[in-house]
Image: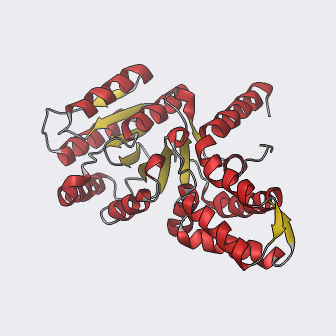
Amino acid sequence: MAVDESHKKNNWFQQLKVGLDKSRIRVAGAITDTFSKRKLDQGALGELEAILIQGDLGVSMASKLSNFIGSMRFDSEISDIEIRKILSEKIESILTPIARPIQLKPANCPHVILVCGVNGSGKTTTIGKLALKWRSEGKAVALVAADTFRAAAVDQLEIWAERSGCSLIAGKPGADPAGLVFNALEKTHADNTDILIVDTAGRLQNRKDLMDELEKIVRVIKKIDPDAPHDTILVLDATIGQNTINQVETFKEAVNISGLVLTKLDGSAKGGVVVALAEKFKLPVHAVGIGEGIEDLQPFHPRGFCQSLLGLEIGD
């Protein structure tokens, strides 16, 4: 690895460690407080399971992890550091298969990415950061402001388009989102655009209208390219913990969610929900966000995440 790449990776892991501090206290801190050196009996396993549930790893995963440790060390002395190391390695093995960056296919012209998420999840900012990354790699990127009923969303996307040098396709306030996306796809096909990213509405309080709208957008996309959208990404706010489970289920009712992006890990004491999501849905986690800066959205690294969550020194 080149020196500058290694430096960037180390900086990112340090940011991740700091960003997950609240989550670390809730999981690793609680384990340390509970297990200094004690026998791993049924009572201790129950306490460990409760800690993992409180850390937002989910009831099912908490039970599996505590049973796993029990199968290895039941009725023997164990320290908090041993528990944290075992958990880190086990969780890493669960998360590694779902840590997959977005794979662009050059044969797709454009590669269509539909981005979903509730208002406030960091959806539009995520789009902007992805667009800026791909523009820096020389890709031609177009953004579609398909949340036509929220002027702030269009304005925010316009700022990102100007910042990244992407083209922006927007309509009049209240315009039909699906019609706008159809026109955008026709235009980007003609222009040989590499990537088309579609920002969609996130008004879950109007759940049926939102789901109908998403389904319609997908239908019109397929009229031009039956294989599109090539990625349908759901952006989730990590600070809401287990409520992310409900959001995935809600959006999956309407569209074929192909991957997740987790934002705001730096402000969350509920980072363990990444593990719960992996266990329940097994959807790829493409990236995580730990801040507002351009470089603060990065591919998901399970080892660094697990070691940060369990309060261990981060290493390759």
Judging depth in this view, the residue of 88 and 220 nearest the camera is 88
Q: Is residue 121 above or below residue 73?
A: above
Horizontal placement of 311 versus 185: left or right? right
28 to the left or right of 229: right
Residues 34 and 152: in front is 34
x, y (%) of residue 295? 57, 29
Q: Is residue 245 left or right of residue 84?
A: left
In the depicted structure, whether residue 281 falls above or below residue 124: below
Residue 244 x %, y %: 43, 57
Q: Residue at x 33, y 53 (%)?
A: 225
For the residue pair 199 and 180, the one nearer the viewer reads as 199
Q: Quadrant of residue 175?
A: top left
> Residue 309: where, in percent of width, then height?
66, 50
Q: Quadrant of residue 4?
A: top right
Q: Is residue 256 visible?
A: no
Residue drawn where x is 73% and y is 62% of the image: 87
Locate residue 113 relative to residue 174 in the image: left or right.
right
What residue appears at the point 60 percent right and 67 percent down from the top-left corner?
50
Q: Is residue 275 above or below residue 23?
A: below
Whether residue 134 is visible, yes or no, is yes
Give the position of the N terminus as an image quadrant.
top right
Q: Which quadrant holds residue 71?
A: bottom right
Please report the residue visible at 44 percent of the width from the left and 30 percent of the height from the top: 140
